[in-house]
Amino acid sequence: MVLVVLLATFTVFYMLPKWAGQDIAVLFAGKATGAEQVEGIRTKLGLDDPLFIQFWDFVKGIPLGRTYANGSDVTRCPAPCFGYSFVTEEPVWNTLKEALPVTAALAAGACVLWLVAGVSTGVVSALKRGSVWDRVAMIGALGGVSLPIFFTGMVAMGIFVHSLGWVHISDNLSTDDSVGVWFETLLLPWIVLALLNAAMYARLTRATMLDVLGEDYIRTARAKGVAERAVITRHALRSAMTPILTVFGLDIGVLLGGAVLTESTFNLPGLGLAAVQAISSKDLPVILGVTLFAALAIAVANLVVDLLYAVIDPRVRLG
Amino acid sequence: MVLRHRPGTANLGGYEKMPTGSPKRRLAAGAALVVAALVTTTACGGGDGDDKSEKGAGYNAALNKVVNASAKKGGTLKFVGKQDFDSLDPQRTYYGMTWDFMRFFTRTLVTYDTKPGAASNKLVGDLATGPGEVSADGKTYTYKLRDDLTWEDGSALTSKDIKYGIERIWATDTITGGPAYIKQTLDPKGEYKGPYKDKSADKLGLKAIETPDDKTIVFKLPKPNGDFEQFLAMPTGAPVKQSKDTGAKYTQQPFSSGPYKIQSHKANKSLVLVRNTAWKKSSDPLRPALPDKITVTISANLEENDKRLMEGDYDIDVNGTGMTQSGRVSAVEDHRSDIDNIQTSFVRYVALVHTAKPLDNVNCRKAVFYATDFAGLQQTRGGAVAGGDIANSVFPKTIPGYTDYDPYGVLARKGKPDLAKAKESLKECGKPSGFSTKLTARTNNPGEVDAAEALQEQLGKVGIKVEVDPIDGAQSSSITGSPKVVKERGYGMTMSGWGPDFPTGQGYAQPLFDSRFIFENGNYNESQIKDKSVDQLFDDAIASTDPAKSKALYEDMNKRLLDNADWMPFIYEKNISWRGPRLTNVYSSAAYNGRYDYVSLGVVK
Amino acid sequence: MTDLHKTGAAVGEPVSGRPAPTAFLEVRDLKVHFPTDDGLVKSVDGLSFQLEKGKTLGIVGESGSGKSVTSLGIMGLHTAGQYGKKKAQISGEIWLDGTELLTADPDAVRKLRGREMAMIFQDPLSSLHPYYTIGQQIVEAYRVHHDVDKKTAKRRAVEMLDRVGIPQPDKRVNSYPHEFSGGMRQRAMIAMSLVNNPELLIADEPTTALDVTVQAQILDLIRDLQKEFGSAVIVITHDLGVVAELADDILVMYGGRCVERGPAEKVFYEPRHPYTWGLLGSMPRLDREQQDRLIPVKGSPPSLINVPAGCAFNPRCPYADIPKDNVTRTVRPELTEVGGRHWAACHMTQEQRERIWTEEIAPKL
């Protein structure tokens, strides 16, 4: 499956411009377009090989590493080789390696926040359906879902960084920075990103809980004399977690591929920002590397969700 | 000179001014405005704001004079920018901001004078003692080097290093990205294959450059080019020490010949320069080298960067493309004396495609000129201050060739259209009730689609029915840059923007108007002008080493192109730039497209 | 009119406003109404009956007649956890072993649920939690009411599974509901409901979702267990056949009210309400000769929002015009005694009904 994802991404990446009648080498060359320059770039990026060979070289490079004929130089791209950037003259893996901790930390913190906030809000809303709390929470959730992250991000920074000066956001977070710096820098992004997703999870949880609370086995639990709190948590929430987990898995996958807007807004040097920067400097290998990595992350997250299904729902366990 | 503002690059989003733009952009700008309002109302209590505006040197203070002239050394000069340098390898960079910045650690034979405004356009000796000695036939340029030239390891910098650096341009499969002007001028047939494939022992096999001794360098041109020194002033003309050449990887850690050297460089994140102690002031009269340290922070959020500039966390925007809309609003309100309204060399235009009927007819093209409401387009670009002045000439004001020639009365009517004349022209064209055509606009360029839609409405008033086709600007080199695609899709007009590589008629106009520059891909002669007399004017102007004569030729060209209604410019672009109050020796340099001259800057503390 | 306050009835005498009864379970004038956007749904509208330990009461009716609502009412499940929904309006009295449940503290009622009174639901698949093993669910039911460790509770679960006839109970205790067949699931459900030796067992359509052959086994099991535990049992069904073998007394509901009740043999062999006749006519019987002549009750169940005036059954009743002065369409018939401990609510005279039953109905059955 992973190979299929890679192939699909790769094909889309290289074939779309071709189908649109465009030449990647020309795109890359920009203004410096003598025919000679374009040919130079074509050779350098390996675009003169047939597509399947390009793909095979790429896939092989991930476990084995790869050697590039970089013009007159020979450049070694050690495993795991996700390509080699001819803008920064570094293996793409270096970029991924530096960006991944930032994206992972952003994703981890934000998803813990939004899961806790979203699910608990959703549960309370479901239990108090139609109440003032429910309405306020759901209007808030609608707002949270609708407000773009650059807006909430800018407002949050405007207030907490600029007006109140409570947090200092570090430029270009790196692994050299202390945990405290990471925490302070990521605090607002966590909250802003969590706000967006918590809103969605609150709505999802509420809807699912209302469904589940109508199930026969919930009535059975009550008929057994189980206390209401346990009915909600042990019986209803357990079932409601299944659809939440599905969405959660996908979200984590997408997030690990780079939270483009959040990272751009807060200038967090994660995968999303790396992709944006690569696009603006037309660094094709990095764009491809990040895209493939993101596709992989999503594929793997899906796989993990499928496995977790079996843990949560005994009905899908194999024989 | 240098600008990487051109159609067909992906960096334009970050590069150009923010503005009135697509709905998404407007939302972003709106969001930023709200934030700005929140912040200013909470942060600035009392008459604080007024005090601030008294502190700065004044609105537009750095346009034609030096603000805070000072020789005081020390401190850290802090740049911020959304876009990283395209490459720190002198032979591989094509961004204007990089060329401006690169002078901190790279020297060339000649360079632009470190003077405010138009005075900067003058080329003066840098590594060389002065401008080159040109032979009578204009084919030989000879330079003498200054004394005490050194590399960052203290070794002497010789004419051979300069030749080697220039030779790297020929290695087109390794050293990609930079302009090829020197190569095309010295070796148009491409006989030399570059130093990495050079069989000679010293790798100095290029015949067109001679180094009779360590302090002399001679260039032999197959045919004269009056702009040759302009090419040498680009970083592609910079020396590279052969033993320190790491080929493609040179971009990571270029070896310094200037007053600063690279301490650390993280692509897309940061760059730190510290003093190069081997550099001798005696060898370099141009660079004051005031700060002890120079930092560049790449940060993705433009609005946030503007805010931090205004809060003093940074001194200056390295990209030099002007502030965002929200940044402008609060800067004009609270820090008016710390900003400059800078005239760039950038022109917004609509190319009228000659292969698309009925625009092959000059009268139909004239009808477009008459029917266009230039003032209306100016509004969509942000008005006279943030957008720029209405254009009347195909050349920007800073380029020789500009005149006030105004055959369609655009300036006379203050940009308003003349619908009667437009209808008359349509009649002469044989299309009295108008015609239909397609107009492209780039979606990644803020405001361009809005301007195209405004033009659509304006032209509709005389029966010219325009269909706006938004295209991805990142791919424009193979859309509007491909005559085949243009024909297939039936484009009659393409909206875009253009800035010069170097401040002469050739540097600005040749890709736009010379019929020999029509390429299958990456074509910028979007009108597809095939006018022998225009081509001839280029040849004559380029061959001339007399600036006055070439200026006159370009002025003729301007008149001819306008009379033929070949290509319709509409805005000379301006932007609002932040001039940090800590900065000393600040001035806008016409040679660097209006950017501040980075190499002269100092800081108060 | 017969005296409504006649005493001595073991089952089904209309009673109200009296002190705590002596019967084990006594329901007095129970009303369960649901406010909805369309109007007030009167699911149960004045129901009374009594039940002694060791006895079985069958409540019979079509869907929507109010029989399940009654059982949930007794269990107190209309009020527990009805989040955000409009609350059911419940009135009347439910006395269980001397305690009135409707006015009792909800938590006290919760503690009775599962221990004093337990319930078996119609569809064991949807009524068992799909994510927990049978064992876990029985253990939970036991430990809610008994302060024992999991091991002890599990031993008890195995014992119960064994008792309800599940083979290899020590293994099956770790199986999930979906791994059981329908009949085994219902056995497990019964094991779960009986794990605390409840004194009242309510079985709501316990066999409806099961195969015919399995139905009989489950009914046998319920009967055996009742004998063993001596509980009072309420069996709720739309199928008279189910209660025929099981029930001591039968209560026929229609439109939220009781239309006939009495000892099982009376209701089966001397039914005195046209609706009961209809039910008998639509019931397949082994002792009937003409198997192909099932006679369905014509028409559809009444709206519980706009219950027909007069006798709720009148639109479907072939004999509605027999009583004079259009009384079936204007006056609601009260329950009247038609024999020993046997009541029916019909405007026709005893004689008319006896004649119709013996001459028209019984021969066709």
Image (tube, coloured by chain):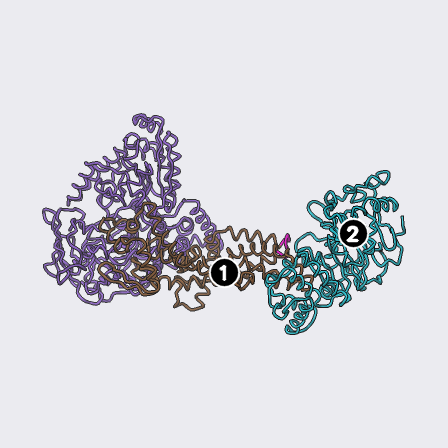
Chain colours: A brown, B purple, C cyan
Local packing at callout 2 (Cα closer than 10 Å; few below 14, some 14-19, many 20+) is many
Q: Find the magenta span and give its range.
A: A126-132
Name which residue lies at 25% across and 58% down: B89
Task: Give the residue pinned by disc 1.
Answer: A306
Q: Position of residue C84 (x, y in %)?
A: 66, 54
Residue C252: which numbered mark, if any?
2
Label 1 close to label 2 by CB (< 8 Å): no
Q: Is residue B575 visible?
A: yes
Q: Position of residue B235 (x, y in %)?
A: 23, 55
Name which residue lies at 53% across and 51% down: A143
| Badges 1 and 2, same chain | no
Amino acid at pointer 1: Asp
Residue B228: which numbered mark, if any?
none
Secondary structure at numbered mark 1: helix
In the displayed structure, does residue C184 sit left or right of residue B500?
Answer: right
C-alpha separation, residue under disc 1 versus residue under disc 2: 50 Å
